[in-house]
Structures are given as C-alpha cells and as structure tokens.
Image (cartoon, rainbow, N blue to C red):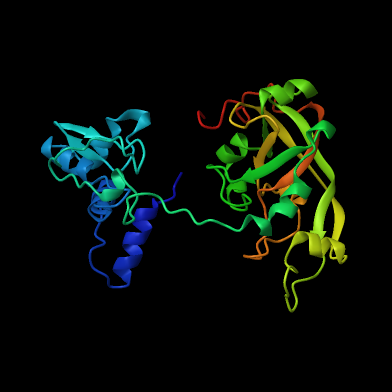
C-alpha cells in the first residue's frame, strides 16, 4: 500500500516536536538502536547485532539469515555462534564463562529470589472450595469446562482488525478447540459449527455489604438468596486438537459474533472482586458443516501452535 511505516511516522513527529535522536532512515536503524536498550533483559538481542557488525552485516540482515524460525531471546554468544534461550530459570543449563558481550543474568538458571527458587503464595482454599465444587462440570451429563483466552492475530474484540482482509480471512468467525476423544463422541470434525450452551450459569445479584464472618463464601450467598441461575449460549467453529485435554473446551474470549462470556458464571472472586472468566461450563452439539470447512481461503484447522 501507500502507508508509511510506523517508525517513519514516529521519527518525523518527534523531529517536528524538536526532539533529538530520531533521525532514523531505515527500519534497521530502529532495530539496532532498540538492541542497545534490550541488553540485560529477557528480550536481549544485542549480541545478534554485535555479531552482525563482526560479519560486516546489518542487524536485520543477520536476523533474516535465521529464517522463519528466528531465535528466542535472550540471545547469547557461545563459541562463535548465536544461541537462543529455550526457557528461563533453567537449572539444567550450563552457561560457563560469558563470551563476547553476553550477559549471564541470574534468572537464566534460577528465579530472581534469595533462594533462587520460585515463590508461590498459598491461598486459603476454603474461600473457593464450595464454589468450585458447585461449578465443576458433570461429565456424565455431557458438561465441559469452558475456558477462553486471546489469540495472537486479533487484538481484543477485533474492533480494528475487522477491517483487515488478511485477518478476517484467517479468523472469519470464532472457534472452539476440542479434544479428538470428545469430538468423536459427538461426530464433530474440524470446520464444523457447534453450539455451546448451559442452563446452569450462576449469577450473583447482591451481597458483600458490611461483611461479617463467612459472608463472602459462596454457600452463604446461595443460602441467603443472592445467587440466581441463568442461561448462556454461543456458537463457534470447531478445531479438533490435542492442545486441550479431554473434558475441556477452549474458545476465543471476545469475538463479536458470539461472545463466550455468556457461558461464564457471574459470581466474582471474593478477594479481588473480579469475575472468574476462565471457569465457564457448557454442553455442546454439532450444528453442521460451516462454510469454511472445505474452503482453503478461510481459517486453518491446523493446531494453533503450528499456524
């Protein structure tokens, strides 16, 4: 298209305001400047730019040589090679003496605590046990845990992305991931449209005023008439994948065509007063093949960690 890159707009805007240091001429200028400020952090790729200079190349040229897999930060230099970091806090990682401009931060092999171990905060389970027991799906009746989350290609509800054809083609509708074992029982294949529904969605109507003793517990709210039962319903395109375990469904949290939050219990967490968005519940049924099932122009039913 005719649009200028973002870095160009930032550069010209900053210069108009009288700021110095924004005289970038190429995207590589931005890439290499940012590398300086990444040093010592989990996004550190300063070593990559340093190695590129040693080889008479630009940072982006050296990055391109790594192909579509790239390299995972923080990047280290070992025996003449660029080495990515598979995971942080890896106690099995043998680093040796830092080479070149490499920085060996403590958190590469340990957590950044006095002991080097992760710090877990024990939560009083009695505050949540009764609610959890009440909402646990009854598998004998065909109920699933329904959890949800974001997907990489779409920001929030796609309020801006919906105008971008390549994203609309990638995700023209919302989706739900289902384990192959569960899908087989319903005759569901990737690309089929399914309905998720429940008539057992819990809704808190009031409570938590002048709290005394156990008044924040779900059981107390229920016994005092502060919980009612509602319904929820959402449709989605099935993706059959082992990314989710049996008995669990995963869906886009906020697609405008069919918001999954209708299947989330409206009973806030008693400590944070936040809704428990990840603890939904639903039954499912197959509605039929979607328009995208056999049309390669839309969606992809490969596991999302591949595509």
* Horizontal relation, residue 252 to residue 103: left or right: right
Residue nearest the viewer, comparing 104 with 111: 111
Residue 297 spot, x, y in % from top left = 62, 27
* Horizontal relation, residue 36 to residue 279: left or right: left
Residue 129 spot, x, y in % from top left = 70, 52
Classify residue 142 by image quadrant: top right
Q: Is residue 77 visible?
A: yes
Residue nearest the viewer, comparing 19 with 211: 211
Classify residue 191 by image quadrant: top right
* Horizontal relation, residue 217 to residue 153: left or right: right
Query: Residue at 37% of width from left, 49% of height from top?
Result: 117
Query: Residue at 71% of width from left, 40% of height from top?
Result: 145
Classify residue 53 by image quadrant: top left
Relative to 27, residue 91 above or below: above
Query: Residue at 51% of width from left, 31% of height from top?
Result: 305
Residue 4 spot, x, y in % from top left = 40, 51
Query: Residue at 74% of width from left, 20% of height from top?
Result: 184
Count of labels in the image? 0
Residue nearest the viewer, comparing 303 with 115: 115
Relative to 271, residue 199 above or below: above
Q: Is residue 257 visible?
A: no
Residue nearest the viewer, comparing 289 with 196: 196
Residue 143 spot, x, y in % from top left = 79, 37
Relative to 180, residue 278 above or below: below
Q: Which residue reaches farthest bottom?
A: 210
């Amino acid at each position: 298209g005719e649009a200028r890159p973002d870095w160009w707009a930032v550069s010209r805007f900053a210069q108009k305001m009288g700021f110095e240091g924004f005289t970038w001429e190429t995207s590589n200028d931005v890439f290499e400047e940012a590398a300086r400020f990444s040093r010592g952090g989990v996004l550190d790729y300063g070593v990559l730019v340093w190695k590129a200079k040693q080889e008479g190349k630009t940072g982006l040229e050296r990055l391109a040589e790594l192909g579509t897999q790239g390299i995972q930060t923080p990047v280290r230099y070992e025996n003449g090679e660029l080495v990515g970091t598979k995971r942080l806090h890896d106690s099995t990682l043998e680093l040796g003496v830092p080479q070149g401009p490499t920085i060996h931060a403590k958190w590469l092999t340990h957590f950044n605590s006095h002991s080097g171990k992760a710090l877990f905060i024990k939560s009083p389970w009695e505050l949540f046990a009764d609610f959890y027991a009440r909402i646990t799906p009854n598998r004998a009746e065909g109920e699933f845990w329904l959890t949800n989350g974001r997907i990489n290609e779409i920001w929030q509800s796609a309020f801006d992305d919906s105008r971008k054809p390549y994203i609309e083609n990638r995700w023209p509708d919302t989706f739900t991931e289902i384990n192959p074992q569960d899908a087989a029982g319903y005759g569901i294949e990737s690309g089929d449209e399914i309905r998720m529904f429940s008539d057992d969605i819990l809704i808190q109507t009031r409570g938590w005023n002048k709290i005394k003793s156990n008044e924040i517990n779900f059981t107390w709210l229920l016994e005092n008439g502060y919980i009612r039962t509602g319904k929820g319903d959402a449709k989605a395109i099935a993706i059959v994948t082992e990314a989710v375990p049996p008995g669990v469904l995963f869906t886009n949290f906020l697609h405008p065509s069919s918001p999954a939050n209708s299947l989330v219990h409206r009973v806030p967490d008693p400590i944070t007063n936040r809704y428990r968005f990840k603890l939904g519940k639903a039954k499912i049924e197959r509605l039929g093949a979607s328009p995208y099932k056999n049309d390669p122009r839309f969606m992809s039913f490969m596991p999302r960690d591949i595509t």
